[in-house]
Image: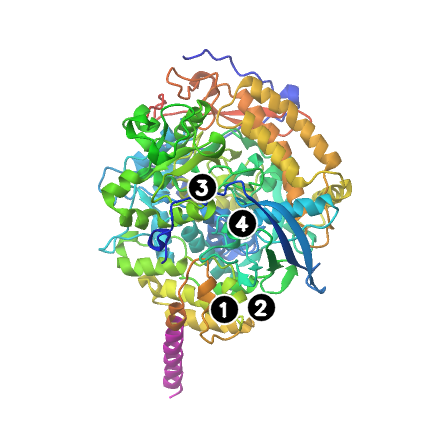
Amino acid sequence: MATLASRGATASHDGDAGRTLNLTLQVWRQKNATSAGKMVTYEAKGISVDMSFLEMLDVVNERLIARGEEPIAFDHDCREGICGMCGMMINGIAHGPERATTACELYMRHFRDGETITIEPWRAKAFPVIKDLVVDRGAFDRIIQAGGYITAPTGGARDANAILVPKADADAAFDYAACISCGACVAMCPNASAMLFTAAKVAHLGHLPQGQPERDDRVLRMVEQMDVEGFGACTNIGECAAVCPKEIPMDVISYMNRDLLRATRRKDREAKTSNE
Amino acid sequence: MATTIAPPTVDVSRRALGGRDIVLDAKIPSGPIEQKWEKHQFEMKLVNPANKRKFTILIVGSGLAGASAAATLAELGYHVTCFCYQDSPRRAHSIAAQGGINAAKNYRNDGDSVYRLFYDTVKGGDFRSREANVYRLAQISVNIIDQCVAQGVPFAREYGGLLDNRSFGGAQVSRTFYARGQTGQQLLLGAYSALSRQIGLGNVDMYPRHEMLDLVVVDGAARGLIARDLVTGEITPYVADAVVLASGGYGNVYYLSTNAKGCNVTADWRAYKRGALFANPCYTQIHPTCIPVTGDHQSKLTLMSESLRNDGRVWVPAKAGDTRAPHQIPERERDYFLERKYPSFGNLVPRDVASRNAKEVCDEGRGVGPGGRGVYLDFADAIKRLGKRVIEERYGNLFDMYHKITGENSYESPMRIYPAIHYTMGGLWVDYNLMSTIPGLFVAGEANFSDHGANRLGASALMQGLADGYFILPYTIGDYLANAKLPKAETTHPAFAESEAEVHARVKRLLGIKGERTVDSFHRELGHIMWDYCGMARTDAGLRHALAQIPQLREEFWQNVNVMGENTELNQSLEKAGRVADFLELGELICTDALNRTESCGGHFREESQTADGEALRDDEHFSHVSAWEYTGVANTPALHKEPLEFEYVHPSQRSYV
């Protein structure tokens, strides 16, 4: 993973603490799931470069309320890039211009004075808009419910060190388990495919010895649910991995396809054997 | 200098305040501490497997405690309904815990044991927790790690494939299990996956984007709740045989905290107003390693895992007013104040000690960064000793996070940190079975008060949340249901109608004020009062000042707040308004408790009560008890009930980290 150290970032603070920006925002406003939405333009003046993108929206909202207008609804919670609740298209890019960064971790120092910023919700058939920038990502939960787990009811576990996991496998499993379920991958994909999300879970559990007994079933059920939800197919474009705030690599998709192929063939074989 | 302490000032007879006659029976099983839980497990009644599905249990919150309880109770066969305000149960704020989870596995062969974890936790809590609860927590810690590994939690491993450990704030053994800097995320996703499996199987009804707005008490027992669908505004009653609150802590009463923006006290508070006692509200934890505030726009504070203190050295300039850049300050003109004052623990002193010392040096004018409210956390020596690669491996994600927020590179210049509100040890009072003073109302995780005393040690919160949810509630709720002989409850009962009507009226009132000020402006002002007068150091005069200000602010809120929009759709202003209204009442209770407890202990530091070295000075004679407050009306002083604390195994001593 590209970290600060390996990217060789510079030590200096930009030296611009306290600097402010005057911005124009074009924001998607939509009253509710059934009404039509439209882009609305707002001026955002005197925005400190030390604000996060969401703090900038807070300031705009405070001003809207003062004018008697309804604030812009947007999802957010932890504001430190881990809960996965926030997410919006910023200038056409999921979570905005910075790599490996959620909207809440995006700071205004990355924008220019006088810039016009467009802000839109995730757009995908499987993520219907609820209001303004808020969408329904319940489909992701249902994909996990279909099989994104290891069956391990409380109480029956053996000693943790009885299961040896090679460090490389544990590290890989962690990398894939880092997904925060924000939906940026779907929002950025021209097909609105959920392959990166689903495959990250398949690869996480597939890399661990504990995940082997259910490996076939898991991939079959999760992919089936993914299709039911109306996500598109993967055509290897790679936008998903490019915007993923947790840098889940595209490799997981081929990993899942391999698992899916193997599981499907095994199932077909079993069906044939039982028919004979 | 040690000051003499006046006896408690607000300790009045409960009769005078119209309080009920409540005996706080912790129901601690008899026998040696090592055997209490096992004995109790055997003595508790079981519910016949065929009958379990007839019982409905409502769980509020889907963090470590809530999700693990929901999954486990559903696995046992109960009918479970779970609520969370986020759009998915996986987003609960447990997810943000970075550092790790303690367990007395002694995999390092460095002298750890259940008894030592118990001992450290009681001492770390400054002798204000219940011994029996803490011992059970230490015992169960071992099973938690096993359970999480079985679920596929990708803990850090060594090359041989065994689990790795590290030592963590305040501990002299390596008992902390971790998953890079995202342990909370991985543990929560483990619990979430178990919960998801039960949702998929139809054993749990999950209601995301729902908020509990009242508890329903029928004939003295918790029998349901009223929840609002945050998308449609619909207000619906839910009936149950038992209710579990696993709704987290109340740190957001300070406005700026490391909590998620949505974290709130509403579920706990409505239960308090329905008769549950609120214990030790003044025990709040201030975390030493957070990124300093940059301006008025600040919406939250970000924690940097205190595992950083394992390799980072904390310092400030030796002289006040030194504005040179850190690398221009020579070694001899730096003050590594934690290493100087606490030679044996150094940078690893407990959180409360580290925080107070940071405040002290900043008060002396030696703070660094904009506004002078910060101290350096410097990795230069560790990088020299171990190499940049090792540091990157250990803390890479934290350094990246710091860079994103500040634009600074900590591999080359020290981080700046300052304390922030992080965790609340207080919460609803519960007995050994985690049941509140309302029968059938159980409280788990940060929402209860039980295990951390006056100060929580690092890597203990995850342990407690999962212990409560996976291994304690599934037993104790069963025992309650087997014994309770509850009549059938229906939403047609007047108690449901009454609660529902109150919720409707409150929503209507909030929307009808249409005043001049935003909800956030009230919240921010409350936060300033709390931080200034009930933060890291508290005084009699300061607390009295806060107690005069908060009711005024609350009054203004109900006259002059402007909540836009309607009830019948997603309305984030309305959600916030309801939560802030509750914080405006809670803040007063916290200050009342802090004023009443004239001693210092753990995270509660009364300036009047300190040792010659400036350490927290307890007053065991007057305050070796849990302060549990009973609601007697918004305008009235709450009634104080005390649960005495007895220490049979770990004898109270002055905490010393020198």
For marks 4 and 1, the one nearer the N-term is 4
Q: Which residue is mark 3?
A: B303
Query: B315 or B616: which is nearer to us?
Result: B315
Q: CA distance from mark 2 to mark 1?
A: 9 Å
**Is B581 drawn above or below residue B657 in the view shown?**
below
Q: Are marks 4 and 2 in contact (CB under 8 Å)?
A: no
Q: Are marks 3 and 1 in contact (CB under 8 Å)?
A: no
Q: Chain of mark 1?
A: A
Does A273 appear in magenta?
Answer: yes
Q: CA distance from mark 3 to mark 2?
A: 34 Å
Q: Amino acid at mark 3?
A: Leu
Q: Which mark is residue A194?
A: 1
Query: B17 or B388: which is nearer to us?
Result: B388
Q: Which mark is residue A108?
A: 4
Q: Residue B348 vs residue B24: left or right?
A: left
Does B407 appear in magenta?
Answer: no
Q: Is residue B169 in view from this perspective?
A: no
Task: Write the start and end of the magenta stretch as one range.
Answer: A256-276
Tell me the crowding category of disc 3: few under 14, some 14 to 19, or many 20 or more residues within 10 angstroms, Cα based: many
Q: Chain of mark 4?
A: A
In the rendered image, the residue lying farthest to the bottom is A276
Q: Secondary structure at mark 1?
A: loop
Between circles 3 and 1, the one closer to the viewer is 3
Give the image location of residue B495, x and y in percent.
70, 43
